[in-house]
Amino acid sequence: WISAIFDVYTFVLGIMIVILESSAKVSFLNRITSKMYRNARFLTYLWGRGIVYFVAGSLQLSQREFLDLIVGAYVCFVGILFIVIGRRASKKLAAARRTACTAEELQENFAKCDVDGKGALTVAQFGDMTRALGLDLNRREVEAAFIQLDYSQTGRLTYESIQMWWTKGADEEIFTEAVIA
């Protein structure tokens, strides 16, 4: 009985992870993803998804079969990496927001890094922008920050999404610190 309950929870969390990490542009998946983000705000952060991975991996570990142990350990490991990298990127982004960079300087740096002129930055261009702003982010942290700021999940960051993050109040950092401290 209890094993069946664990199986159901593991299955539901697995489906949830697949939907969250899916890059498919299917309307019903986008609606489900939007509802998940709206109802569980922590999922919009990389560390939040890491918590879900860790819980799913822990449930898998509890099954005590050889394959379950291997899969569970791997999913827990990925979850821990998401938490560590996501938290580090969040802290560096929060510190960057407290710098003396003005909105004009932010827009200037955005325009310089938007080399293809599409009005939106790729991950590589966003990495260039973070370096231009004086942020010391490694490749994984740039990717984590990009995922965190890509509210529309298009794979590109518009100036509006970066500006929205830059001008937000401290509520995001308070939420982040309260949940993962």
Image (tube, grey):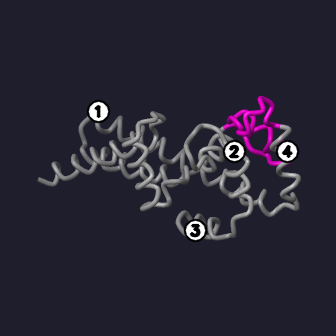
Query: In this rendering, which labeled residue sits more in front, label 3 or label 1?
Result: 3
Q: Quadrant of residue 114?
A: top right
Residue 92 visible in this rendered orientation of the protein: no
Residue placed most toward the observer, 127 or 161: 161
Label pair 4/1, CB-CB below 8 angstroms = no
- Of pointers 4 and 1, the one earlier in the residue sequence: 1
Label 1 or label 2, whichever comes before in sequence order: 1
**Which comes before the other along the chain, label 2 or label 4?**
4
Earlier along the polypeptide chain: callout 4 or callout 3? 4
Give whichever of 56, 133 is nearer the camera.
Answer: 133
Callout 2: SS: strand
Label 1 sits on residue: 67
Q: CA distance from mark 3 to mark 2?
A: 24 Å
Q: Is residue 45 left or right of residue 24?
A: right
Percent coordinates x, y for residue 153 in the rendering: 55, 43
Residue ID at (65%, 47%): 145
Highlighted range, magenta = 113-139
Dot in front, 4 or 3: 4
- Identify the amino acid type marked 1: Leu
Which residue position is annotated with label 3?
A: 175
Q: Which residue is mark 4?
A: 109
How dense is the environment of label 4, judged by Cα within 10 Å: few (below 14), some, or many (20 and up)? some
Find out whether the residues at labels 3 and 2 contact each other: C-beta distance under 8 Å: no
Q: Which mark is residue 158?
A: 2
Q: Is residue 116 magenta?
A: yes
Q: The disc labelled 2 sits on which kind of residue?
A: Thr
Real-space CA distance between mark 4 and mark 3, rounded to the nearest whole angstrom: 28 Å
Indicate left or right for 115 with 89 as reference. Answer: right
